[in-house]
């Protein structure tokens, strides 16, 4: 694979689990000499590469580490061990409403998210009409996000994510919140982004969606690598053609 945009090398992510809230403080007071936590490994020794223009799907049961993996790519989390290399502007649709300030209006959040991703106010101005057209939330764009339904939040979040010229688009299972009409529009947009050479990492429980857009699949099983296959060798998930 030439010039991977994303590279994981032996990546693991551990969380400290405490039996009681006070145990964390007790551990700090002993300068960690007395261990009062257990390690929970959400991701364990995972390695893969994703090339430019590839649609890479991640599947696995709930709790298998899919969202943790995407959050490390987005820079929200850092690995406990191993290395994560990301070369390109990342736009992410992860947890519902992540990155939105609920007290701000939808319009304010569009500009806030765009600026975080490095766009100037003029660049956001140029994209604003397309964002609102895709989101289809009408006058609610000028209301606080805390008044939105979950479907409206995901509509606006997806509209922003696809209109900030990402080189890498991360899509978690938030799309499952939307209605069938909106999900179909989202999938058409994902196909359009694929044709433009955007690199996409897609997490879903819907095998039909994985078959429709995936070039390769990473199966996570309790945080471990499961099965990685191309379309040719894993046709039951990715389909039989070589698009």
Image (tube, rainbow, N blue to C red):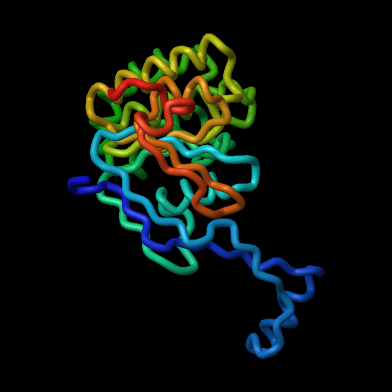
Quarter of the C terminus within the rendering = top left
Camera-nearest residue between 116 and 90: 90
Q: Residue furthest top?
A: 181
**Relative to 131, does residue 84 appear above or below in the rendering?**
below
Q: Residue furthest right?
A: 20
| Res. 197 image quadrant | top left
**Does residue 198 appear in the picture of this structure?**
yes
| Res. 201 image quadrant | top left
Quarter of the N terminus within the rendering = top left
Q: Position of residue 106 (x, y in %)?
A: 49, 27
The residue positioned 46% from the left and 63% from the top of the image is 79
Camera-nearest residue between 13 and 163: 13
The residue positioned 64% from the left and 85% from the top of the image is 32
The residue positioned 70% from the left and 87% from the top of the image is 29
Q: Position of residue 209 (x, y in %)?
A: 48, 22
Seen in the image, is 190 located left or right of residue 125? right
| Res. 21 image quadrant | bottom right
The residue positioned 44% from the left and 34% from the top of the image is 202
**Does residue 113 appear in the picture of this structure?**
no
**Relative to 163, does residue 23 appear above or below in the rendering?**
below
Camera-nearest residue between 129 and 65: 65
Seen in the image, is 242 located left or right of residue 220? left
Q: Position of residue 78 (x, y in %)?
A: 46, 61
Q: Position of residue 20 (x, y in %)?
A: 81, 69
Count of picture labels: 0
Q: Residue furthest left?
A: 2
């Amino acid at each position: 694979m030439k010039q991977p945009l994303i590279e994981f090398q032996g990546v693991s992510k551990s969380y400290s689990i405490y039996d009681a809230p006070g145990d964390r403080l007790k551990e700090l007071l002993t300068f960690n000499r007395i261990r009062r936590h257990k390690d929970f490994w959400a991701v364990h020794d995972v390695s893969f590469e994703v090339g430019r223009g590839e649609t890479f799907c991640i599947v696995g049961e709930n709790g298998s580490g899919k969202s943790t993996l995407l959050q490390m790519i987005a820079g929200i989390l850092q690995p406990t061990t191993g290395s994560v290399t990301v070369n390109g502007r990342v736009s992410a649709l992860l947890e519902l409403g992540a990155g939105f300030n609920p007290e701000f209006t939808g319009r304010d959040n569009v500009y806030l998210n765009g600026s975080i991703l490095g766009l100037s106010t003029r660049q956001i101005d140029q994209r604003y009409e397309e964002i609102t057209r895709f989101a289809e939330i009408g006058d609610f764009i000028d209301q606080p996000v805390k008044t939105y339904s979950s479907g409206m939040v995901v509509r606006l979040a997806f509209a922003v994510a696809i209109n900030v010229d990402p080189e890498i688009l991360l899509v978690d299972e938030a799309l499952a919140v939307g209605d069938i009409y909106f999900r179909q529009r989202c999938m058409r947009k994902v196909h359009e982004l694929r044709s433009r050479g955007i690199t996409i990492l897609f997490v879903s429980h819907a095998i039909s969606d994985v078959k429709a857009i995936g070039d390769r699949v990473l199966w996570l099983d309790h945080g471990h690598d499961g099965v990685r296959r191309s379309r040719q060798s894993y046709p039951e998930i990715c389909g039989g053609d070589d698009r």
